[in-house]
Image (cartoon, grey):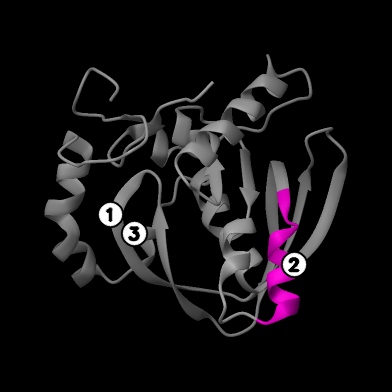
Amino acid sequence: MILPIVAYGDPVLRKMCSEIEPEYPELDSLIANMWETMYKANGVGLAAPQIGKPIRLFLVDTSPFAEDEELSPEEREELNGFKRVFINAKIKSESGPKWAFNEGCLSIPDIREDVNRHPEIQVTYMDADFNSRTETFDGLLARVIQHEYDHIEGVLFTDKISSLKRRLLKGKLTNISKGKISVDYKMRFPAQKKVR
């Protein structure tokens, strides 16, 4: 089932999310719905707050990046096979000099900005079967995971740009929260009562 994606301005996007247990109600169907929602919106990641649930759950599928001709064959191969569910994730370390990459977000359509992030991270998390994992990721994988991780911490990519750029985007962001934007996927806008 395709779920509406919560738009910028909704308080759920600013919440520090709660950990969940294996008994979380209908977790398998929630994850399946999140995959379906993310693919319908042409995303490479989706966090639970983006569908209105303040829980520490996000998923990532970087396959679309594998088509980027500027990447090395090794990078393309790594990105093409990467599809993962992250439950109760914690970033344990970030390393390397920060680098800029143009990011967007399904909750903030039609806005893209360069964001500086560390190139390597170590993450502990539970997979979809609640097996504990600790892994190190780098490059674009690390970036996508950091972006989704920020969501479960109540942080948006627009928080990581300069205050001047944020001021310049204020009108666009207000329009997004009011639903004054055209999107080709289902969204829920904080200033409107209906989903569209």
Extreme residue toward the right, this view: 131
- Give the Cα separation between the discs numbered 2 and 1: 28 Å
Q: As rendered, which of 105 and 62 lies closer to the eye?
A: 62
Amino acid carrying mark 1 in the image: Asp
* Circles 2 and 1 in contact, beta carbons < 8 Å: no
> For mark 2, what is the residue?
78
Labels 1 and 3: the sequence-earlier one: 1
Q: Which mark is residue 158?
A: 3
Q: Is residue 11 left or right of residue 53?
A: left
| Label 1: which secondary element | strand
Quadrant (top left, top right, bottom left, bottom right) of the N terminus = top right
Labels 2 and 1: the sequence-earlier one: 2
What residue appears at the point 49 percent right and 46 percent down from the top-left corner? 151
Quadrant (top left, top right, bottom left, bottom right) of the C terminus = top left
- Residue 53 x, y percent position in the rendering: 51, 27
Q: Nearer the viewer, mark 1 or mark 3?
A: 1
Q: Is residue 120 magenta?
A: no
> For mark 1, what is the residue?
110
Residue extent of the magenta highlight: 72-83
The relative height of residue 135 versus residue 148 in the rendered view (above or below) is below
- Residue 131 x, y percent position in the rendering: 88, 39
